[in-house]
Amino acid sequence: MIKDVVSIGDKLEIISLNGKHNELMSDHVYVSQLLDFVDNNKAVLSMPIKKGHIIPLPVGEKYIIYFYSSKGLFQCNVIITNRYKLKNIYVVVVEFLSELEKIQRRQYYRIDCLMDIIYHVVTEKEIKLTYKIVKNEYETSDEKQTDIETLEEYKKIWYEGTITDLSGGGARFYSSNQHQQGETIQLSLDLNMKGKKLIIPCNIISSVKMTNRQGYFEHRVMFTDISRDDREMVIKYIFAEERRQRKRENGLD
């Protein structure tokens, strides 16, 4: 249970999962605090304040929350179900949408690098086709085969990009395509380790026009359904790359 892991008064950070509200599309993380539990599935948080201004988190919006508890760093997904003023304090009520996942702090060690990558945008059409095929909602086998072939064509669409920094929890990269915050992508990483290319599901946290490269957009992504082995491989690459960079800086390479 969440109450067994986090406690009233614990600090937390909030990042939006979808981009309907442009004011939340920034590199900033919003800081809040756990004030109370409504029940086993809901909690009351203080409304974030930034530069003296209250950030009015919208009802119905989904977020990732990072809890800094005495037992470590944890994350989970939530949705805002209510907001109001309580004894001169603006608060929000969140409903937990996922179980708490413990995060190793080293997952967030970030390194600057330049790495050419390709990525695939998972569109709504692709999701609907996949669901239809899995549910086998067809009257004839020919209809199903047509959708399978259409889905395979969608999956062949990949875009080029360049990563500028990488961590065990996500990445920053740029490309000539603009995307929407909250979109799901599959990121293909070639880390030159064991000859394996990683395909990592990600959520786009932000996508903004670059001021120093005309026609390009910078994207921040958070890894979502990444396996423990794949995350460990990313982390090993980061530390190996850091050693290589230090050698070059010291003239040893």
Image: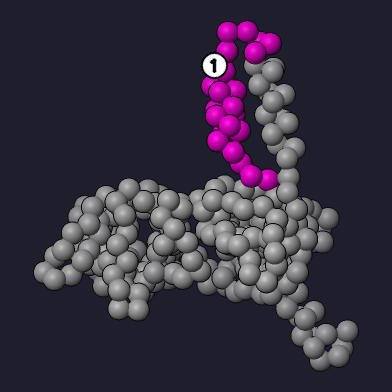
Q: Is residue 5 left or right of residue 137?
A: left
Is any atom of residue 37 visible in this view? Answer: no
Q: Give the residue displayed 30% in from the left and 74% down from the top.
A: 53
**Numbered range of the magenta stretch:** 120-143
User: Could you classify mark 1 by the number of other residues whose Cα lies within 10 Å: few (under 14), some (14-19), or many (20 or more)?
Assistant: few
* Place of residue 96 in the rendered image (x, y in percent of width and height, measured from the top left): 34, 51
Q: Give the residue displayed 60% in from the left and 23% down from the top.
A: 133
* Place of residue 171 in the rendered image (x, y in percent of width and height, measured from the top left): 62, 63
Q: Please identify the quarter of the rendering in which residue 63 is found.
A: bottom left
How many discs mark residues in the rendered view? 1
Tell me if residue 132 is in the magenta stretch: yes
Tell me if residue 59 is in the magenta stretch: no
- Three-letter amino acid code of the residue under disc 1: Glu
Q: Is residue 3 left or right of residue 106?
A: left
- Quadrant in the picture for the N terminus: bottom left
Name the dominant secondary structure of the magenta segment. helix
Q: Is residue 226 above or below residue 35?
A: above
Return the residue found at the far right.
253
